[in-house]
Amino acid sequence: MKVPVSNKRIVAAMSGGVDSSVTAALLKRDGYEVIGVTLQLYSGVPQRKGACCAGQDIYDAGRVAEKLAIPHYVLDYEERFRARVIADFAETYARGETPIPCVRCNQRIKFADLMDSARALGAGALATGHYVRRLEAPGGPELHRAADESRDQSYFLFATTAEQLAFLRFPLGGMSKPAVRAIAAELGLGNAEKPDSQDICFVPDGTYAEVVRKLKPAAAEPGDIVDEKGRVLGRHEGVAGFTVGQRKRLGLAGSDEPLFVVELDAARARIVVGPRASLRTRIISLKDVNWLADPLLAADCAVKVRSMRPPVPAAVSAGPDGTASVELREPEEAVAPGQACVFYKGTRVLGGGWIARP
């Protein structure tokens, strides 16, 4: 790792999981003055097994910090998390889009407010347990996919700015998960076998639609399920329970071919369904694009339109006011508004934006 020689203090974001714990341990082993910081993001929400940021996690992080003999602070970010992540999550679903709260949390909490707190503590860097690589280059640090493709989290960090990247460090980017767990076991960390966290940490029992209904009741209003010609085929109990590409829970029978959600018309509380062919698109419009490289490099690149999909060849053209247009070499299915489209050149993250419409 590289931090200013005159400042060997690093803040390690400690979620209570094995990844962030090993991150802190590696920094301590390498001779840095490590300060562990855990964020309290919410309380009073029943958690399913494996959810991240639960109350138990603060305790686990504290135990690890004690084991490593490093100071540990818990910062109450509950109000700002509710306003900037949970409210956005509900509003996005209410608009008929499919949100990614982990990106918003990184963008608006961890790499914003937490970074400010790290600087206030006199740190020269903020380290996290993300599986992504930060590589030094003549033009400044670059963001790259993790060495272990199965663990790569670069899709969720596309909104990281160049200024933030200069301050961030990712010690696990070149490691595999088994290697990380082995280090945790070797050091006697109590969370060496702790299960991985789930994406939506604040949703009890995985029923995200209930969270949306409480904050945005209009998203739970029943409406029509229609085909692409506007003919009514059935009824639904709220657009918040659906996403583009969905086939299950439509309650439609007797169709000549399988039907999928192809559009969510939240303004009219309508779900539009159609055949699989209607899910395919080659042109995608993006908004709020964040560039980490010269946009000209994206004229011939690869893009990911879902976190679990592999990158596919595309050409990205930057537009005005933070927009961009993506032309896919081959059609992709179920490109959902509200999801992210991230641009890659080899392993390097060039940038990304939010899908406005396919």
Image: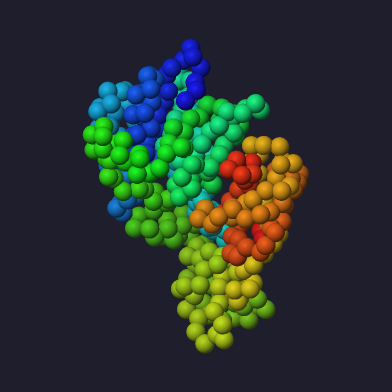
Front residue of this view, candidates 211 and 163: 163
Residue farthest to the top, as pictured: 6
Location of residue 113 with respect to 271 vertically, above or below? above
- The residue drawn where x is 25% and y is 27% is 66
- The residue drawn where x is 49% and y is 14% is 5
Front residue of this view, candidates 172 and 246: 172
Front residue of this view, candidates 349 and 11: 349
Location of residue 211 with respect to 231 vertically, above or below? above
On screen, residue 265 versus residue 122, left or right, reads: right
Residue 84 percent across, percent down from the top left = 50, 42
Evaluate whether residue 193 shows in this view. yes
- The residue drawn where x is 53% and y is 26% is 167
- The residue drawn where x is 43% and y is 36% is 172
Evaluate whether residue 73 shows in this view. no
Query: Residue 55 sits in which quadrant?
Result: top left
Q: How is the image coloured?
A: rainbow
Residue 250 percent across, percent down from the top left = 49, 75
Residue 144 percent across, percent down from the top left = 56, 39
On screen, residue 143 versus residue 325, left or right, reads: left
Location of residue 290 with respect to 338 vertically, above or below? above
Residue 112 percent across, percent down from the top left = 52, 33
Could you tell me which quadrant the C terminus lies in?
A: bottom right
Front residue of this view, candidates 237 and 13: 13
For the image shown, how many numbered marks are present on the structure?
A: 0
